[in-house]
Image (tube, helix red, strand yellow):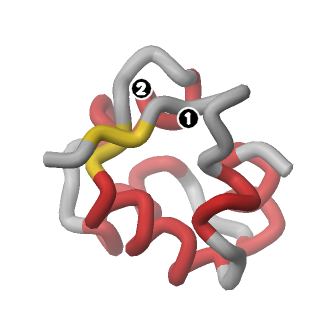
Amino acid sequence: MTLCELRKQKGYTQEQTANILKIGVSTYNQYENGTRSVPAPVAEAISSLFGVQTADIFSPKYFTVSKT
């Protein structure tokens, strides 16, 4: 599943998701669109929020997870 699909399943807007994660909406939008690398701690927080394994949504095929 994509971040967008997972977010919509939870009934969240991008703004709500960003607020929960304590990041900017534009930053979250870039994560969802795959135009920005996701820091490992944020990837873990997103996975926890959506109740999925990090590897299930942040596979190298779709995302780049940065170590910082």
Identify the mark at residue 32; answer none if there is no mark.
Answer: 1
- In the figure, is residue 3 to the left or right of 41? right
Identify the mark at residue 30; answer none if there is no mark.
Answer: 2
The residue positioned 29% from the left and 35% from the top of the image is 27
Q: Tag count in the figure?
A: 2
In the current view of this chain or complex, which residue is farthest to the top?
A: 35
Mark 1 secondary-structure assignment: helix
Mark 2 secondary-structure assignment: helix
The residue positioned 41% from the left and 26% from the top of the image is 30
Quadrant assignment, res 55: bottom right
Quadrant assignment, res 47: bottom right
Q: Nearer the viewer, residue 52 or 19?
A: 52
The three-letter amino acid code for the residue at tag 2 is Gln
Residue 17: x, y in percent?
45, 62
Residue 58: x, y in percent?
61, 48
The three-letter amino acid code for the residue at tag 1 is Glu
Badge 1 density bin: few <14, some 14–19, many ≥20, Cα 10 Å: some
Badge 2 density bin: few <14, some 14–19, many ≥20, Cα 10 Å: some
50, above or below 25, in the image: below
> Cα distance, mark 2 to mark 1?
5 Å
The residue positioned 67% from the left and 74% from the top of the image is 53
- In the figure, is residue 14 to the left or right of 53? left
The residue positioned 40% from the left and 52% from the top of the image is 15
66, above or below 53, in the image: above
- In the figure, is residue 34 to the left or right of 2? left
Marks 2/1 in contact by CB < 8 Å: the verdict is yes
